Amino acid sequence: MSNKEALVNYTLRLADTNLILGHRLSEWCGHAPSLEEDIAMANIALDLIGQANSLLIYAAKTEGKGRTEDDLAYLRDEREYYNSLLSEQPNGDFACTIMRQFLSDAYDIHFYALLTKSTDDILAALAVKGLKEVTYHLRHTSAWVERLGGGTEESHLRIAKAVEELWCYTGDMFAMNAGDKKLVQDGISVDTDKVRPLWQKTVEEVFHRSGLTMPSNVWQQSGSREAKHSEHLGFLLAEMQHLHRTYPQAQW
């Protein structure tokens, strides 16, 4: 894999995770437990999709094959997506969605902080913007984890169940392929081995305040770096890409 191919793959992976997670959150629009939360989740989804759009523009430009950000978002198949396995998991109930977002936010805040130091000026600039947004995201979702964990017996059971169901997908966020390691040597990408202990500390602190127990099961799902996914991504893409594929020349 050339450095150019590694950079395209890396940028696509960042974009794909945000795009898929943003789409998942958008599914809550009009269905959240309160009007305020409906607006908050929609705003977080817009932030994530906005980040994805900027990254896809950069990936398309770097690739140099004449594809646009829309082509990359809507005209790739399931085995051409590199989003994290966690991001594609179904919403489930509100507690499950909050936990999925919290685990992602706890990763992003440390990842973006390190990416701001990238020798790639575009990625560094996008990371600066993303860090501002994810700071709010993490504040919002960690507050909800604490609220649900320390709330009623029912809310505690639901957020604890969400941890149990989602934990096996968290290790996939830290995986690195050969291309990533090349980029790390050049100071372009983030060494996720440095992110892991920071993420772990953030999660442990919030779990402690929420009365939640860190899972002891260390077995983890993996595969997103090789575009291998759970059964959920194909259904999500079929819905997300339907309009564009049906009317490929449509313009607003």
Image (spheres, helix red, strand yellow):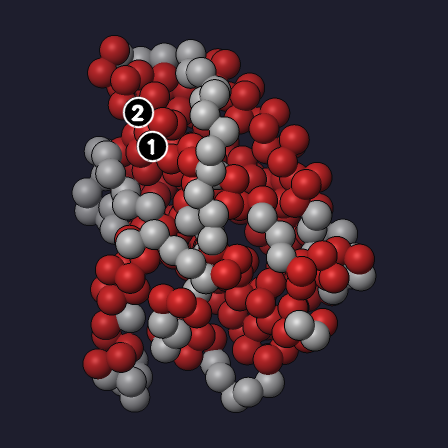
Report which residue position mark 1 lands on: 165
* Mark 2 secondary-structure assignment: helix
User: Which of the 4 image quarters holds residue 197?
Assistant: top right
| Spatial CA span between label 2 and label 1 | 6 Å
| Name of the residue lying farthest toward the left | 31
Residue under the image location 39 percent in, 74 percent down: 76
Quadrant in which the C terminus is drawn: bottom left
| 194 relative to 54, above or below | above
**Residue 210 seen by the camera:** no
Looking at the image, which residue sits at the far front? 219
Q: Residues within 10 Å of mark 2 (few under 14, many from 20)?
A: some
Q: Quadrant of residue 195?
A: top right
In the image, residue 19 lies at what x, y percent? 42, 59
Up/down of 8 relative to 66, above or below: above
Element marked by disc 1: helix
In-front residue for pair 181/205: 181
Q: Position of residue 223 (x, y in %)?
A: 47, 53
What residue does disc 2 label? 161
Locate the N terminus and report the quarter of the image it occupies. bottom right
Q: Position of residue 95 (x, y in %)?
A: 30, 30
**Residue 95 visible in the shown view:** yes
* Nearer the observer, 157 or 115: 157
Tag 1: residue type?
Answer: Glu
The residue under the point 28% across, 53% down is 232
Amino acid tagged 2: Lys
CB within 8 Å, label 2 to label 1: yes
Q: Is residue 31 above or below residue 178?
A: above
For the point 58% across and 67% down, which residue is it? 9
Residue at point 20%, 47% (across, down):
30
- Whether residue 92 sits left or right of residue 179 in the image: it is left
How packed mark 1 is, by other alpha carbons closer than 10 Å (few <14, some 14-19, many 20 or more), is some
**What is the quadrant of residue 11 in the picture?**
bottom right
